[in-house]
Image: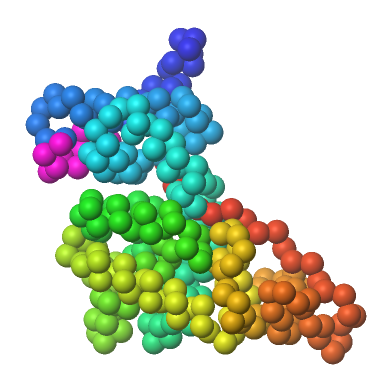
Amino acid sequence: MSPEEHSEFWRKVQFTVDKDVVRTDRSNMFFRGENNPNVEIMRRILLNYAVFNPDMGYCQGMSDLVAPLLTEIQDESDTFWCFVGLMENTIFISSPRDEDMERQLMYLRELLRLMLPRFHQHLTRLGEDGLQLLFCHRWVLLCFKREFPDAEALRMWEACWAHYQTDYFHLFLCVAIIVLYGDDVTEQQLATDQMLLHFSNLSMHMNGELVLRKARSLLYQFRLLPRIPCSLHDLCKLCGPGMWDSRYIPAIECSGEHPDCQSCPYGGTATPESPPLPSPNQPNEGKRGSKTRDIFTFRKHS
């Protein structure tokens, strides 16, 4: 690097990495103590990744994702390439674009409306603040890393990486947490800030195995729904063929929740293998849908 490039790299990347690694998982024996060589290894992995993928660079929270990999693998080179694979292949942390978070929150709101209507109604009563789902942003951004012990979090990562029936299994994990631990929110009619505090206090006090089993059950229930809104049609799109088994194909209906209703190809009811049904006042050619956006992950910090 030229002196100017090195100065910019230090300001945008190295300064933040140096600040983050010394406070990541310090209660873990693997990273505990002053001048711990494993902390330096984690630092090198993150700096190398920022050079390897300058478009992504470094975002706060990446150290939380490298730490359990390094603890498990205990080899710098292998951990680096596993981290590269994680960033490339895990849909909920593979895009740096902020707008993609909105797509994930939309999916999650729709899942809650279908599977937990009482909780969704409470969010609706809270207005825009409630529907922003602030309490689950950290779950998505850090892949549940700060909600469960490393061993349980890694099992959840593996379940997401399997892409079984959906590329968005992490959203079913979010719903599972709310199903299992969200009763107090609706029973006590908690406000937005109280709801955030409620779920924050559950960190490291939830049963990860129970959450994982519940998420699998919710995915199974979702696949058996007779009708799904068009807003959730892409929930299983990227994992390839076979998302619905041969004996059951749900009907897809327009949810009516579009800024521009003309952009929805499902003005009526349709199935994934049939053309959309035209409405009585429209010609018999299906309307073209809007372009889908990629999926979220880290928000860049200045």
Q: In this view, does 95 lie to the left or right of 174?
A: right
Which residue appears at 23% of the width and 53% of the height? Answer: 151
Name the magenta segment's main secondary structure. loop
Which residue appears at 41% of the width and 76% of the height? Answer: 218
Residue that extends furthest to the front in the rendered view of this protein: 246
Q: Is residue 19 visible?
A: no
> Residue 19 in the image: x percent, y percent?
27, 32
Above or below residue 293? Residue 35 is above
Q: What stretch is highlighted in magenta?
A: 20-30
Q: Is residue 259 visible?
A: yes
Above or below residue 1? Residue 11 is below
Whether residue 49 is in magenta: the answer is no
> Residue 180 in the image: x percent, y percent?
27, 77
Above or below residue 275? Residue 199 is above
> Residue 265 in the image: x percent, y percent?
75, 73
Find residue 208 and report its image quarter: bottom left
Find residue 144 and report its image quarter: bottom left
Q: In which quarter of the image is the C terminus?
A: top left
Which residue appears at 41% of the width and 69% of the height? Answer: 172
Relative depth, front residue between 161 and 96:
161
Which residue appears at 37% of the width and 54% of the height? Answer: 158
Scheme of image coloration: rainbow
Relative depth, front residue between 262 and 245:
245
Whether residue 24 is in magenta: the answer is yes
Q: Is residue 221 left or right of residue 210?
A: right
> Residue 147 in the image: x percent, y percent?
25, 59
Q: In this view, does 146 lie to the left or right of 9?
A: left
Q: In this view, does 98 lie to the left or right of 176?
A: right
Above or below residue 263? Residue 84 is above
